[in-house]
Image (tube, grey):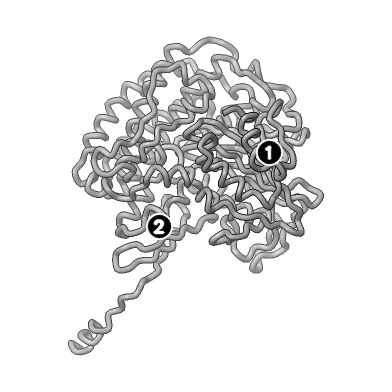
Amino acid sequence: MSPQEILNKLTEKFADAIVEAKVEGVLEPYAKVKVESIREISSLMRDDSDLQFDTLMCLSGMDYGKGILGVVYNLGSIAKKHKFTLKIEISVEAANVSSVESVWRTADWHEREAFDLFGIVFTDHPDLRRILLPDDWEGYPLRKDYQVQEFYHGMKVPY
Amino acid sequence: MAESIQTQDRKLRTEEMVIQMGPQHPSTHGVLRLEVTVEGEIVTHVKPYIGYLHRCFEKHAEQMGNYSQVIPYVDRMDYVAAMSMEWSYVLGMERMLGIQVPERVEYIRVIMAELQRIASHTIAIGTFGLDLGAFTPFLFLLRDREMILEIFERTCGARLLYNYFWIGGLSHDVPLDFVDSTRQFCTQFKKTIVEVNNLLSYNEIFIKRTANVGILPANVAINYAASGPVLRGSGVDWDLRRDDHYSIYNRFDWQPQIGKGERGTLGDCWDRYIVRCREMEQSVKIIEQAIEQLPDGDVQSAIPKRIRPNASEIYIRTEAPRGELGFYIVSDGSGSPYRVKGRSSSFVNLSVLPEITRGYMIADLVAILGSIDIVLGEIDR
């Protein structure tokens, strides 16, 4: 399916949930959706017989600055050989997103990474812990306003 | 004394036990820690702990002065397949900038990436044999890998971390003896594959250790977004070189290799292993064709003077030796990247480990981990 057809399909079912979408003139056609509906949209994307997005290629945390965080879902379909991108935006104060781990198991580690480096909390995630950094690390390093901690267990951190 | 032993016998503990495998364990292929819960010899649960090799690649990439300076960092992700790592990032940047690279560059890139695939698979297969007690194939394979590294060294001066693929071109043209030495390598390596097949692939002991072990069904592999030989070992016919239409792979005669469950069940360790073996044969085939067709030209003519893509973003993926290597690159229109996320194949492939080790012996855990073929530099970034 072409990106436009995918978007039409999505609009058909979730007209209210789509905040913004762009399929022409961009390298990655995307739809920005409301954060509350990401799980339902993900399920639809996976299960619909025309869409069949069977893999989550990549899940990236984002910091757009000015207190806005985001998550980008790059979806791909092995069965249908098409791609699409979903995006959500959330504020730093309420950085809660429902986990899509139950839809694509691969999201497990990707979400832990986004939690680790951006501090985005994925609700209903079965095992949300830091993954790359030590458990007692302070702050979220990939946020744009990150200040590195002075000492870690007596070791000086900034070099 | 005899009585106390008897008393101990009667009180033999039977509950589950947690043992730590790694971070300094030879068969974890790097600094990986597995928290293994066992009941006797049977593994009930495995919990991987990663991050020991975390070098803040994504943070560094954001703080680089420009896009080209990220390439050496990309090299250090999967340090045994650095050419393939560079290609993915560079290709993403070229798509963002709308650059079409010259024919000669495309051909050299294909040859280098396929040589790199062979070099990487020799390590994968060699150390897999090593984990299971077969020492000799490892030496044969590393001897041939040395020939590849020499070709790389004569081309760009480095043996492991090349910084060879640049945005829009290559750092150097290939040396004069490149065509001859690559042909020589292909001739030699075809013999080695036969030797390795005789020594390892169809060795009864090896088959006993790997067939019907660590079975990964196709639907689970897809749901976990496993890629590369791990996915193809489960019988899914999916190779980005063919299915994602990048570069010039459609000009060559080659076939993606998939597991067929020949020696056991579809998706077992042996299938993942044999996919790698057969992929090396296909890579040799691609290299031989590319060498024949190698056109003349300037390899630096398309390199841009100033790299400043418009505000845009791309998710680029290529078929690295270990599977789908993706980069999600976001530009805000300035001279350095706003965000670079590396989606590494080993990271995703390793996450399937708890799923496929349940119910096997501890010794099988080593075989399963070896068959996934991880590089920790790529996982921890």
Q: Three-letter amino acid code at disc 1?
A: Ala
Q: Position of residue B313 (x, y in %)?
A: 69, 34
Q: Three-letter amino acid code at disc 2?
A: His
| Secondary structure state at the residue bearing disc 1 | strand
Which residue matches tag 1? A31
Left or right? Give the position of A136 relative to B81: right
Q: Is residue B16 above or below residue A132?
A: below
| Secondary structure state at the residue bearing disc 2 | loop
Residue B200 in view, yes or no? yes
Q: Position of residue A30 (x, y in %)?
A: 67, 36
| Between marks 1 and 2 in the image, the one whose residue lies nearer the viewer | 1
**Residue in view at x 35 percent, y 66 percent:** B38
**Residue in view at x 42 percent, y 12 percent:** B292
Which residue matches tag 2? B25
Q: Quadrant of residue B307?
A: top right
Q: How many marks?
A: 2
Q: Nearer the viewer, residue A14 or B183?
A: A14
Left or right? Give the position of A75 relative to B31: right
The chain holding disc 2 is B
Q: Quadrant of residue B237?
A: top left
Q: Specify the quadrant that holds the N terminus of chain B.
A: bottom left
Indicate which disc residue A104 carries: none
Q: Nearer the viewer, residue B46 or B54?
A: B46
The chain holding disc 1 is A
Same subunit, tags 1 and 2: no
Q: Quadrant of residue B22?
A: bottom left
Residue found at the far right of this picture = A66
Q: Position of residue B85 (x, y in %)?
A: 54, 35
Q: Position of residue B250 (x, y in %)?
A: 47, 19
Q: Quote the CA–CA distance across marks 1 and 2.
A: 45 Å
Task: Say few, some or many: other residues with alpha carbon within 10 Å of mark 1 (under 14 / 14 to 19 / 20 or more).
Answer: many
Q: Is residue B85 above or below residue A96?
A: above
